[in-house]
């Protein structure tokens, strides 16, 4: 809990720098922090990844289970995304049931994956209307230094890219596991890009101090053909329609840079 | 999904008979609940939504009070009978998320700094849902806030645009929302040209997105006019009834 | 939160008037407030109604689902009644899980319907012991100005009266919907009447201010043949046996008046 | 329900051998738990119920304290093993309702205004249930309050009457409660002829109801005598044991 | 809430006595309080017992249900142990979901039963992989005066010893009850013994006042062949390895004494 | 259970190639999370566990603060993806119990009385579980406390011993824990020869138990040396990097 005073000075400092095209941590307005990706690090999970975005650190584990399909999608697997703000990640996080922040994070990550149709859910049906694969994407925030959405989306898609599903056959209506695994069928790699508006100026990948002073946050996710697949505005400020379009154009460019890193990783 | 539903026919007419950039019929009423400090009701297509405001009032629990401004709280909630399959009355993750983005949509509009150490509590109850409930909820909540006399920089108005059946369309209904290609809810302060809520589901090119945003803003402006009319009608009604009031 | 002082004065004022056979809102001791009934207003619900009792306003939606019967009633449908005190209805209501007041309301409404055997539950069995219709009665209080029990019971029975159930046939042990609907089979129309005892005098249909000063509340529900089907005393005061019998006689008379309104509506 | 159970035979005798207006055997014990400020135990038929009272004591959480009187809290709770099918230990809606009506039954009897800013906490634990647990719970709770030295205008006593097998009957047991026609639990302060708890399930004409109430009140009076005896027995026991006490 | 002062004096008093080989309630260091066992007292439960250990009083009810086995134990019944700290038992207990103390109690009682393999779970399979008996052991603390673990373990095993299971046969894959009951198949009688270390001296069966001043608590459960089947250290103090071995030897001896009481009861 | 797994072969070698009294490979890192006041990471076999410490800091909620010492709170928690079958993120009864015994293991080691009215919060997150997580969790938490500068009488170190395949073994892995005969987790302060956590599952004679305890303590002493090395490595790294620090 920094005092109101300090945060006002900090706000001025951050905003003034940004007005000059600079940032407190030395980045340019459209620069991401350094991105480090590790994949397949949790052997007990069917898929996993750890992403470090500057000092922000997020781990994602993917677990596969067999369950029932939704009644309006009897031939499709089920995607379930969850985010935990475990209290070791930040002095602000508390143990207990998920709050609105972690629910929003989970839903925005889920939206990017779902709306880009990244997972070929229709290939995850085992017995139509009865048994399908259920994909649990668990986002685990380990250190919160801002822009959890991009770090989590990134870690989730990398974890899905290394997810494997056991092979099986159906005998007398029962599922029998067979030796070996197939990769999770993916058709897209959605990438989200988050910008903050600080005194009317857009900056990419806000870190924690910037998030604390920003007017609004805008996250735009792109599918690999360059289409927008999800948007979420956050924060208690506003954006002009012009800013939104400008943000979309910046975000598209950045998403391509990041997708290249992912594909190479 | 098994049979492809035709969302827009060859004459550019939608499943409910509307043109591409046509709003659903909207009915607004202000000041309809006696306990709330402010209240309003909207019907937009088959959506039926109530909003009520309590405050500025004492904050419970007290430690949540803010020293320099009012605490704005918002609850978007759906009645169990508002949707096809009964919804548990416990708040779903979707309702929690929408409560958050709606609160953030109103924070820039309300002069919260005028009421330090108090809370302003905004309740949106969806009695029947037909697509676009968060937008209709914002529109009606704005009227409830005005009815409660909460000072605002501008009314907030909300409307979605999106893509359905291959066309950009305004104010998506339930089936267009579920079977269409994209949905973009937008909340807007027309006097400031400021967007305070923005989300998107679906797939759109940047060009389509730009057009859809503009379409949504056009819708917002039309609804804004209806909001003002509804408030005027309320004031008129109050004027006419002030002689009859029996309770202070 | 009115001060203790004001409420004491208010209490005296209300009680004195009642001793003179009058009430603060101009009604006679045995008068209901105006009753307005709208039915079938929520198209997405299988049944619905809105009741206004003076300024008290309650909405009820009925949803129908298919589920399992109770093990001791394998051939009967299931009735589930729930009440929500949504916080827009009163400055006293808080968001969150149901409290004792709303649980009591739901249980008293449920008791009137269940004990009068209003719903022909035995006609709601689909496959004995396996599948039955489940009737969800959701009471939604929209404005609380006293006597929620009568308003809710009334709205519930009106909603049940316009409830329709999809037609179906059983094919290979599975339920197949057919076109068309049947009305929910009802055999009774229970009506509840609530009285308050204020300084030993009984008044019908207490509004909020009277509830705040009353000693005790007594709700008596009647089936259409004039028998009592449910009773609930509330409040932290007492009633004499004579008062109870007097209340039952008043309530019977009033229940017949209200039932007539319902049948005509 | 498939086979009709004969609840009252042609000689007017009930399934457990009782006559129509006969109570079940009742056993009462006062002061049986060492930690509670007051406690008591009842067996009524196969019902086995414990009650304990803590207070007047400091209120937790503090903001619940009342400036002008004690806060009475009551919890009626059933052990998981007290019924045929294991009951989850989390309070059911039924338990919440009964806790409320039992609390309201005691509020008029206790001199709460003598202990402002404190709480009096009343706990009723049903160890075995056999019909009529709320009434037996009230009866035993009354003794626990007396044992705790809580000043009361009168002991509260409770008993149900109802209709089973076509007859008005006193003190319904489990099968009469489930398969009978009506059940009316009544709590009563005999010295004031005042009813403080009243509920009814089932179907009765007003005439039957009137008779049933009177029957219940007769039952109450009989149990009231037993309550007084049990308290007397406790005082006697204390008198006899005061020399042996080793702890203050 | 006794003041810090009083408890310090009390602590000294208790500790000094113990250093002299005596205890405030007159017992010797290795003496249990009086043990009273009643069994089969709750007719509605399949098994039950009440144990009084001095003023500590615990009731246990056993209920039997039919349910699904765990997927990794398809041929075994299921044991579920739960403990409730109902608020009538102590001024320190609060109504509400179980806290860490009652969860620990349930898990330690469960551990003794499970690890000694007391219940022949493999005989409780009805239809392999589908239906098995589920044994609910519900520990109900009625008066807390210390050493809940031993009292609860004792009451649990006595309740299990008088538990009966309905007879049944399988007809067309459905379970049909037959007249009569069999006893729950048991192969062991685990007994737990709890010691407290107070100023480095071990005492058996600490009562509440001793628990409040003790450094650490050590519970050791024994199967009937004298092997250790469960251990739990509690409290925020430490034990030396020598103390642990000493405690194990004392506990073994005491467990045999108590088992004799159980067998005779 | 259907096929008997050979946990120890005729040469006394275990399923993962270890000898009976051999520890799994251990990797320790100190100070790896930037937000926490102290943090550490352990890999022990396939276990991967993070620990973080916040405090001494203000207590929330305030009424939990202790007048004469710091409140130590501990949460042992498993990530949903850390085990074969996805674990719900809500704390299980097992996690609640382990949080309690781990907290009790640390209370005797920390100078809590130096920080009255504050809390020290210890978080252990199991990212991958492979048997012995509570012990590895204690070992790594000890380093996180040291990294946070919390004054301790001694480092706490933990290790299990037990019986598997008929042999006493050190540091059981997942399969030995599940299919073996007994498991004894022990936490220990080597400088004081003091055991602060002790549990046992399984069946052992007193003699076997005594040997197993001694084996566990031997394991503790080996890991203790690794803990000290890891702390030394951290100090070295700090020394080398102090010139580069840019934030105070």
Image (cartoon, coloured by chain):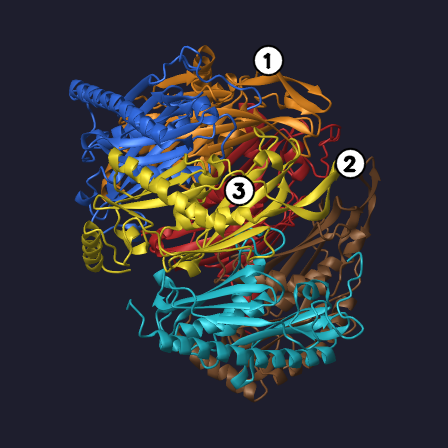
Chain colours: A brown, B cyan, C yellow, D blue, E orange, F red
Question: x%, y% of residue F209?
Answer: 55, 28
Question: x%, y% of residue A147?
Answer: 59, 70
Q: Which mark is residue A143?
A: none
* Label 1 to label 3: alpha-carbon separation: 35 Å
Mark 2 crowd level (few <14, some 14–19, many ≥20, 10 Å Cα): few
The residue located at (77%, 62%) in the rendering is B5
Q: Chain of mark 3?
A: C
Q: Chain of mark 1?
A: E
* Label 2 to label 1: alpha-carbon separation: 35 Å
Mark 3 crowd level (few <14, some 14–19, many ≥20, 10 Å Cα): some
Instruction: Tell me the residue that label 2 is attached to.
Output: C172
The residue located at (36%, 64%) in the rendering is B59
Quarter of the picture holding the C terminus of chain B: bottom left
- Camera-near label (1 vs 3) is 3
Relative to B225, does residue D13 appear above or below in the rendering?
Answer: above
Question: x%, y% of residue D195?
Answer: 27, 34
Q: Which mark is residue E179?
A: 1
* Label 2 to label 3: alpha-carbon separation: 29 Å
Mark 1 crowd level (few <14, some 14–19, many ≥20, 10 Å Cα): few
Quarter of the picture holding the N terminus of chain B: bottom right
F225 or E105, nearer to the observer: E105
Instruction: Tell me the residue that label 3 is attached to.
Output: C80
Q: Are marks 2 and 3 on the same chain?
A: yes
């Amino acid at each position: 809990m920094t005092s109101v005073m300090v945060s006002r000075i900090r706000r001025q400092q951050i905003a003034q720098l940004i007005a000059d095209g600079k940032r407190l941590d030395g980045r340019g307005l459209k620069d991401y922090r350094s991105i480090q990706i590790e994949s397949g690090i949790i052997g007990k999970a069917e898929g996993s990844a750890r992403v470090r975005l500057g000092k922000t650190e997020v781990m994602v584990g993917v677990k596969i289970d067999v369950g029932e399909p939704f009644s309006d999608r009897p031939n499709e697997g089920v995607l379930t995304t969850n985010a935990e703000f475990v209290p070791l990640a930040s002095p602000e996080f508390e143990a207990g049931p998920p709050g609105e922040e972690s629910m929003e994070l989970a839903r925005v990550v889920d939206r990017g994956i779902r709306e880009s149709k990244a997972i070929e859910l229709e290939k995850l049906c085992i017995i139509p209307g009865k048994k399908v694969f259920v994909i649990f994407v668990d986002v685990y925030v380990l250190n919160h230094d801002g822009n959890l959405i991009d770090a989590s989306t990134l870690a989730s898609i990398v974890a899905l890219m290394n997810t494997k599903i056991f092979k099986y056959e159906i005998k007398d209506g029962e599922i029998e596991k067979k030796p070996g695994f197939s990769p999770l069928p993916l058709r897209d790699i959605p990438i989200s890009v988050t910008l903050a508006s600080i005194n009317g100026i857009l900056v990419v990948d806000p870190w924690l101090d910037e998030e604390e002073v920003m007017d609004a946050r805008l996250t735009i996710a792109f599918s690999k053909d360059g289409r927008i697949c999800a948007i979420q505005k956050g924060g208690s400020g506003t954006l002009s329609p012009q800013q939104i379009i400008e943000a979309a154009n910046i975000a598209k460019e950045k998403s391509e840079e990041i997708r290249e890193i992912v594909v190479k990783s | 999904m098994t049979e492809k539903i035709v969302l827009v026919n060859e004459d550019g007419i939608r499943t409910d008979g509307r043109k591409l950039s046509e709003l659903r019929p909207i009915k607004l009423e202000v000041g309809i609940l006696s306990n709330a400090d402010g209240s309003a009701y909207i019907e937009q297509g088959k959506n039926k939504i109530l909003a009520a405001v309590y405050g500025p009032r004492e904050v419970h629990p007290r430690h949540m009070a803010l020293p320099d401004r009012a605490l704005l709280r918002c609850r978007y909630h759906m009645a169990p009978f508002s949707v096809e399959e009964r919804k548990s009355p416990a708040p779903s993750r979707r309702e929690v998320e929408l409560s958050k983005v709606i609160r953030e949509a109103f924070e820039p509009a309300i002069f919260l700094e005028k009421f330090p150490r108090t809370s302003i509590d905004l309740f949106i109850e969806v009695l029947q849902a037909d697509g676009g409930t968060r937008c209709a909820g914002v529109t009606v909540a704005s009227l409830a806030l005005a009815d409660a006399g909460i000072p605002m920089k501008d009314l907030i108005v909300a409307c979605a645009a999106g893509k359905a059946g291959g066309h950009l369309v305004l104010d998506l209904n339930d089936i267009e929302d579920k079977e269409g290609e994209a949905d973009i809810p937008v909340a807007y302060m027309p006097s400031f040209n400021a967007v305070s809520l923005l989300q998107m589901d679906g797939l759109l090119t940047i060009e389509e997105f730009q057009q859809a945003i503009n379409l949504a803003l056009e819708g917002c402006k039309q609804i804004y006019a209806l909001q003002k009319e509804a408030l005027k009608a309320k004031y008129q009604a109050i004027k006419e009834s002030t002689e009859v009031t029996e309770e202070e």
